Image: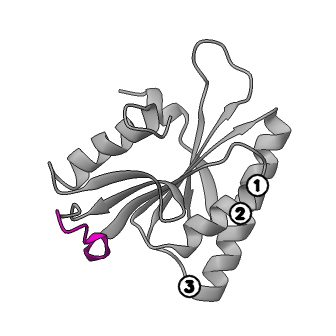
């Protein structure tokens, strides 16, 4: 999912092409403590990665450590932050959203509100040929369900 050719890697590349511009970015998996990161400008031949800045940070949570992953995302600066996770049932999804909300609210109270867009995506742990993603956007100190918006033209 996070390697070159994987769905998240390719989605991040598509996002970067549209929002940053062709060849002006790098997509890095398992890099600088994140599962996936888009940085800009692209790293030059001298491997001068420190001349770039995160533009998208993504954490992929395979277990139930929502607080750890959201805290990591909250502490780094990037215009877009994404958590991808899975849930056993609706109760677990709601718990993960509450935990994420608490982390983001606490972080904002301590360091001030973030100007980053924060997306939360979760799919059931058991699914058929395609997962049914639930998607949320953090806005006005609450999670707004944007799942249905994804299927609208």
Quadrant assignment, res 122: top right
Give how far across and how far down residue 64 sits, in percent: 78, 48
Q: Which mark is residue 116?
A: none
SS under mark 1: loop
Query: Residue 74 lies in magenta, yes or no?
Result: no
* Left-right relation of 121 to 117: right
Residue lying furthest right: 91
Give how far across and how far down residue 119 sits, in percent: 53, 52
Give how far across and how far down residue 140 sits, in percent: 57, 66
**In percent of the image, x 48 and y 40: which residue is there?**
2
User: How busy is the neighbourhood of tag 3: few (under 14 within 10 Å), some, or many (20 plus)?
Assistant: few
Would you say the residues marked 2 and 3 are in contact, meaning their CB atoms lie under 8 Å apart? no
Question: Rounded to the nearest whole Å, what is the CA distance between mark 1 and mark 2?
Answer: 6 Å
Q: Which residue is mark 2?
A: 68
Would you say the residues marked 1 and 3 are in contact, meaning their CB atoms lie under 8 Å apart? no
Would you say the residues marked 1 and 2 are in contact, meaning their CB atoms lie under 8 Å apart? yes
Give how far across and how far down residue 75 sits, in percent: 56, 75
SS under mark 3: loop
Residue interval drawn in magenta: 45-52
**In percent of the image, x 43 and y 32: which residue is there?**
6
SS under mark 2: helix
Question: Rounded to the nearest whole Å, what is the CA distance between mark 2 and mark 3?
Answer: 19 Å
**In percent of the image, x 78 and y 46: which residue is there?**
94
Q: How is the image coloured?
A: one colour
Q: Which residue is mark 1?
A: 65
Q: Main secondary structure of the magenta part?
A: loop
Q: Which residue is mark 3?
A: 112
Sequence-wise, the earlier of marks 1 and 3 is 1
Question: Rounded to the nearest whole Å, what is the CA distance between mark 1 and mark 3?
Answer: 24 Å
* Left-right relation of 63 to 46: right
Relative to 34, does residue 18 appear above or below in the rendering?
A: above
């Amino acid at each position: 999912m996070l390697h070159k050719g994987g769905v998240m890697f390719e989605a991040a590349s598509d996002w970067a092409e549209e929002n940053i511009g062709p060849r002006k970015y790098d997509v890095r998996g398992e890099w600088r403590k994140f599962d996936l990161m888009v940085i800009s400008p692209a790293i030059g031949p001298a491997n001068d990665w420190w001349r770039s800045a995160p533009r998208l940070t993504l954490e992929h949570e395979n277990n139930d450590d929502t607080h750890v992953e959201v805290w990591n995302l909250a502490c780094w600066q990037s215009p877009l932050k994404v958590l991808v996770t899975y849930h056993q049932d609706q109760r677990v999804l709601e718990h993960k959203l509450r935990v994420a909300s608490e982390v983001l609210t606490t972080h904002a109270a301590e360091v001030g509100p973030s100007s980053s867009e924060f997306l939360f995506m979760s799919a059931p742990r058991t699914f058929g040929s395609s997962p049914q993603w639930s998607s949320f956007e953090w806005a006005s100190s609450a999670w707004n369900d944007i799942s249905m918006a994804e299927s609208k033209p």
